[in-house]
Image (spheres, rainbow, N blue to C red):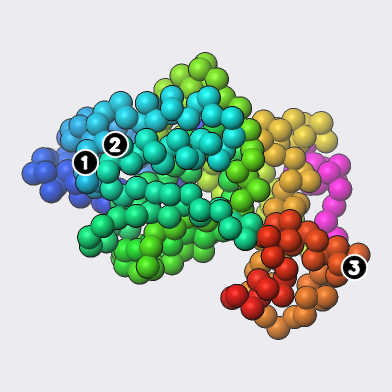
Amino acid sequence: MERRMISAGFVEDALAGVRRAGLPVAPLLARAGIPDPVGASVSAEQYGALWREIARALDDEYFGMGARPMRAGSFAMLCQVILHAATLEEALKRALRFLRLVLDAPHGRLEVADGLARIVLEDDGPARSAFAYRTFWVIVHGITCWLVGRRIPLRGVDFRAPSPAHGPDYGLFFGAPVRFSQPASVLAFDAAFLKLPARRDEKALAEFLRRAPANILVRYRHDAGLAARVRVHLRAAPPTAWPGVGAIAARLRLSELTLRRRLKAEGQTYRDIKEEVRRSLALEWLGAGGRGVGEIAADLGFSEPSAFHRAFRKWTGQSPGAYRRRG
């Protein structure tokens, strides 16, 4: 498993429910191999172990932050519920229904419009902590990425709650624009991913649960895996100068066959990654202003503006001009 760190702020957030219940935190930290007091980031394995310890102490896999406890075993049952879904869309709908039954609130609904899929959380009363909504996103995004065998890149994450002191950690964790104090908590991604097929079976689920929840914290993060290294290389060069698959393999000191095989294991292809980065750059450049649509199309490597318009409509369901006007 990739070595990724979880900030100390998220550790303190996880311990807040233990303290509210009047339980000692020192034994939980000790069993998770985390120093007390928490003074630095911890590994995903340590954080995952702490999550399990807190779940056992509270009999709640949601850190005591839902309207009802998410009793021990609920996460495993959630995975069973989505396992035999045909597509990501079906899996998400099943997951959201299950979590509503278990937690009552917050609960989510899936909205699809203008090429964008949005999971909108509904929650009566005052806003919960940003960590409460983050945990919901970690669970839903993590298990569905696992189910389809690849990372689902996010377009944005909104929080109804105000920013905590370690607010910047949220953007680093999700690898997407994050906004706090919004009217609703919303996680958004390209709707095209909803058609991805489920790729897991019972044997894969047993292995996944053996390493959960540490694996959902790092396995499909934006900065994990070979695909992330390819993205770094692509973003370092203009799209008009992007190398072919053989050249990018050489830069990564891999054979072309090995690159293709390892990307396939992550559920990706070099073409998919180029498309993802090109789409991301298009959204950034259109949002920033200062350049015309034709200039952006050329900079992205499109032979003519009409080709860019067709691609952008495929990505977002709207034209570049409409996207820019809507901000």
The secondary structure type at the circle numbered 2 is helix
Residue type at tag 3: Glu
Q: Which of the two residues, 36 or 167, is positioned nearer the viewer here?
A: 167
Residue at the spot 43% in from the left edge and 62% down from the top edge: 158
Residue at the spot 28% in from the left edge and 48% down from the top edge: 105
**x and y percentages locating residue 222 in the rendered image:** 56, 49
User: Could you tell me how far apart the alpha carbons at marks 2 and 3 are, in whole angstroms?
Assistant: 51 Å
Q: Quadrant of residue 44?
A: top left
* Residue bounds of the magenta highlight: 240-255
User: Is 217 left or right of 38, judged from the image as shown?
Assistant: right
Residue at the spot 60% in from the left edge and 75% down from the top edge: 326
- Whether 319 is drawn above or below 56: the answer is below
Residue 251 lies in magenta, yes or no?
A: yes
Q: Which residue is mark 3?
A: 304
Q: Which residue is mark 1?
A: 68
Query: Seen from this angle, which residue lies furthest right?
Result: 303
Camera-side mark, 2 or 3: 2
Neighbours of disc 1 within 10 Å: few (<14), some (14-19), many (20+): some
Residue 16 lies in magenta, yes or no?
A: no
- Whether 257 is drawn above or below 183: the answer is above
Residue type at tag 1: Arg
Q: Earlier in the sequence, mark 1 or mark 3?
A: 1
Neighbours of disc 2 within 10 Å: few (<14), some (14-19), many (20+): some
**x and y percentages locating residue 145 in the rendered image:** 54, 38
